[in-house]
């Protein structure tokens, strides 16, 4: 894992959020990967609890732009939370996940899907009837059972936990992730 890339991404994510509050930026180290297309998710936590998480499933813009845009969206536009306040930023921990391209996971049925899932490794995209949801691999930490993981993912996509259809499409991806030190 490239720690210099992780540092560059974490600083850019925090600077993007701080800029929304008019706070001065930290110096940003350069990295050649920042100019290449990349897909990131930025996750914000406070004392271990989720405070925002927004990202891109596909690399369609330079990594530098992607992480900045997703950081601001996680802080200000995650519909599950009120926008982050300037006062909260000091005790908010930033995590950046860099996604590999998603690959189709052909399955015959739900039992086949459960057999193919790799706990702790796979991020999963669930897609059906024009709706989709994703869980990063980190979600396995709180939902270690494949059946539970898939049930909650279906609910996130707007279906019931027991929903299944022959039209379900699953995709898997992996991530490299970097976290700031724990905030008080």
Image (cartoon, rainbow, N blue to C red):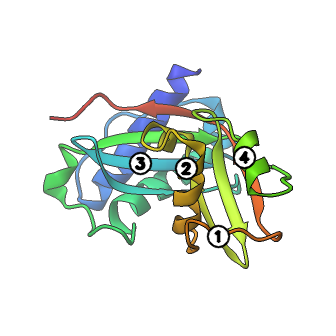
From the image, state whether disc 2 or disc 1 is nearer to you: 1
Residue picked out by circle 2: 149
Q: CA distance from mark 1 to mark 4?
A: 19 Å
Eye-nearest disc, 1 or 4: 1
Picture residue at 74% right of the left edge, 56% below the top:
110
Return the x and y of residue 19 as percentages of the image width and height: 31, 55
Report helix, strand or loop for mark 2: helix
The quarter of the picture where residue 166 lies is bottom right
Considering only order in the chain, which callout, 2 or 4, is on the residue closer to the N terminus? 2
What residue is at 70 percent from the left and 55 percent from the top? Answer: 58
Label 3 to label 4: alpha-carbon separation: 19 Å
Reading the chain from its start, which is encountered first: label 3 or label 1?
3
Secondary structure at badge 1 equals: loop
Q: Residues within 10 Å of mark 4 (few under 14, many from 20)?
A: many
> On the image, numbered disc 3 is attached to which residue?
43
CB-based contact (under 8 Å), mark 3 and mark 2: no
**Up-down: is 167 above or below 99?**
below
**Rounded to the nearest whole Å, what is the CA distance between mark 3 and mark 2?**
19 Å
Image coordinates for residue 17, horizontal then vertical, percent: 33, 54
Say which element carries label 4. Answer: strand
Q: Quadrant of residue 1?
A: top right
């Amino acid at each position: 894992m490239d720690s210099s890339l992780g540092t560059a991404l974490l600083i850019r994510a925090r600077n993007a959020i701080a800029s929304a509050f008019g706070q001065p930026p930290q110096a940003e180290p350069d990295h050649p990967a920042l100019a290449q297309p990349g897909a990131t998710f930025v996750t914000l936590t406070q004392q271990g609890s989720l405070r925002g998480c927004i990202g891109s499933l596909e690399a369609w813009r330079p990594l530098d732009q992607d992480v900045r845009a997703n950081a601001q969206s996680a802080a200000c536009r995650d519909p599950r939370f009120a926008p982050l306040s300037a006062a909260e930023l000091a005790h908010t921990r930033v995590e950046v996940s860099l996604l590999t391209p998603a690959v189709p996971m052909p399955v015959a049925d739900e039992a086949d899907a459960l057999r193919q899932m790799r706990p702790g490794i796979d991020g999963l995209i669930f897609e059906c009837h024009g709706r989709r949801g994703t869980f990063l691999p980190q979600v396995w930490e709180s939902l270690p059972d494949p059946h539970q993981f898939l049930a909650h993912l279906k609910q996130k996509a707007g279906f019931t936990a027991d929903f299944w259809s022959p039209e379900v499409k699953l995709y898997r991806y992996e991530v490299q992730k970097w976290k700031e030190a724990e905030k008080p």
